[in-house]
Amino acid sequence: MARKGADNSYDVDEFNAFLASRFDGLSKQLKKIARFVLDNPVDTALDTAAEIANRIGVQPSSLIRFAQALGFDGFSEIQRIFRAGLVQQLPGYSANYSDRIEKLKEGADDTGSDHPVLNVFIDANIDAINALRGDAAVAKLEQAVAHINGARNVYVIGQRRSYPVAIYMYYMMRNLDVPTYLLDGVGGLLPEQGNQIGPEDTVIVVTFPNYSDQVIALAHKAAEAGAKVVSLTDKLVSPIVKISDVYFLSDRVEVSGFRTVAGTMCLAQTLMIALGMARENAAGE
Amino acid sequence: MARKGADNSYDVDEFNAFLASRFDGLSKQLKKIARFVLDNPVDTALDTAAEIANRIGVQPSSLIRFAQALGFDGFSEIQRIFRAGLVQQLPGYSANYSDRIEKLKEGADDTGSDHPVLNVFIDANIDAINALRGDAAVAKLEQAVAHINGARNVYVIGQRRSYPVAIYMYYMMRNLDVPTYLLDGVGGLLPEQGNQIGPEDTVIVVTFPNYSDQVIALAHKAAEAGAKVVSLTDKLVSPIVKISDVYFLSDRVEVSGFRTVAGTMCLAQTLMIALGMARENAAGE
DNA sequence: TCCCTGTTGGAATTTTAATTCCGATTTCAG
DNA sequence: CTGAAATCGGAATTAAAATTCCAACAGGGA
């Protein structure tokens, strides 16, 4: 991957400082452009030169002159700087994060020192948790809480890696006096454990790749029986999403082959807190 | 095809949901593209079609086919959706978790609006996880890993709120071929389950306030029998610390009376990753 | 096995955007 | 006021990216 782009030396702050230092020496039109660039980093990053020129009220060629006056080849180079800066500002998207994971993987059996493991893994978990901001929206939480509170019984399913999450929710809901049952598959009886699920019930399904056939089958059966399905899974294309009334996504991050369970746990706990607060309020009225 | 208006009527979530609904009907290559788009919104928004195609390992023309299969004129239209979504995500991310937690606590029983819950809780978890950087030092991880690898058998104990963490470690260590037993207290037999613990064994204890008497008693018995004790708990004054060979602290953060379990989970997973890497290296030599 | 249908890779083409060029205009020194 | 240099607008050109097209291929059914 020949990743060049000149000497990629600038970041946005450096560029802005540099631009400010040169500002006085610029011509009238170029100053207009400079002001726009300093004030509108996002538009500078994303719009086409023609659009930007139009908004400023100058010709596109002036943008190129502007860039060249500052020593760049063309306006595109400046846009690259701003695009890179924009990505870094995105929540949960530290740009060098993937790099660090790559480095970790490369150096994994190098020395046996696991010094980088901890930090990278912490970063990965923070990333995973941050990703929830976008996904576990208030509306979805409220919907899920309503399904749980409206149910005659709540059933929680999760096997293997998802089992700790399932059992956590089971524990919390029991403490919140929600009539909850854990379908734990003890004795290989998972299919049978779902027999009594009916239209007044809600099923909470936790499943991640590779999705357990038994769990998916049981969720299908529950959905067909008319139960509400609330799911915690990894992707929109997960087989559980299409039969879910509400779904939450987490777990998009992987380090050294380990998927972070902390993000999913955080999601589960968020749901439980939302539930707890809703019930507190209901009890108080 | 009932495509939404030619103007920007899709937002990213709608698009993703729509894509997921059509996923099954797509061809093999198109599924590859769909997965990339779902997983990499930022790159989808900003890279050129040629770059994206190259990264996925398909031809640029497939991207256009992908877009058209979904009813769009071309891939550029999809990029527009993602660019708009990307800009919307930008402003967030102010700062200072502690302040926000304070705010939530003040307003907690205010209105019943759980709007701030999610963000504050996410912040709290990030705080909890960040705190691990200081506490789960490399030396301690190595020590714990050595105790686990050096043991004839490993026993994991954790009840109630700590049980999900315990069972997670049990699951992971079984997958790593560590001879592990979960002391789960089924049938009220927790005291008896520890009878066979001896000086060649290691016990991993997970315990948080209020510390279960049975768990503490069992840990004491194990320590007296000469077993190594590795503990996950909350504070230096926790009753488990003084009998531990290695201890890790987490869980210092509390929101609305809920202690974060995600931080502890992250700690447990860090320990498991360190263990996994150590065993990989050992096997490779 | 062979054909048919749908899918794919890759070159060719079109579209769009970036950049250059040049004549017109402004600025300012003398 | 005049003329030269700097600046600018806008058409022309070039570069880059998106899209189309077609031949080859893969998979499934007769």
Image (cartoon, coloured by chain):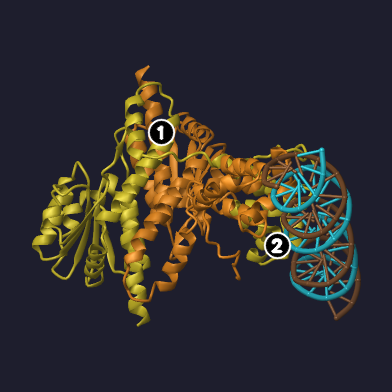
Chain colours: A orange, B yellow, C brown, D cyan
Does mark 1 fall on the same chain as mark 2?
Answer: yes
The quarter of the rendered structure image containing the C terminus of chain B is: bottom left
Whether residue A183 is visible here, answered yes or no, is yes
**Residue that sits furthest to the left in the current view:** B224
Q: CA distance from mark 2 to mark 1?
A: 42 Å
- Quadrant of residue A84 within the rendered picture: bottom right
- On screen, residue A250 above or below B97: below
A212 or A37, nearer to the observer: A37
The quarter of the rendered structure image containing the N terminus of chain B is: top right
- Quadrant of residue B150 within the rendered picture: bottom left
- Residue B124: percent from left, percent from top: 35, 41
> Considering the numbered disc 1 on the image, is that residue within a helix, a strand or a loop?
helix
**Residue that sits furthest to the bottom in the current view:** B285
**Rendered residue at 38%/16% (across/down):** A285
Mark nearest the camera among 2 and 1 is 2
- Quadrant of residue A121 within the rendered picture: bottom left
Mark 1 Cα within 10 Å, few/some/many (few <14, many 20+)?
many
* Side of A149 relative to B67 (left or right): left
- On screen, residue A24 above or below B40: above
Label 2 or label 1, whichever comes before in sequence order: 2
Mark 2 Cα within 10 Å, few/some/many (few <14, many 20+)?
few
The chain identifier of the residue carrying mark 2 reads B
- Which residue bears the numbered disc 2? B50
- On screen, residue B99 above or below A235: above
Q: Amino acid at mark 1?
A: Val
Q: Amino acid at mark 2?
A: Ala
- Which residue bears the numbered disc 1? B117
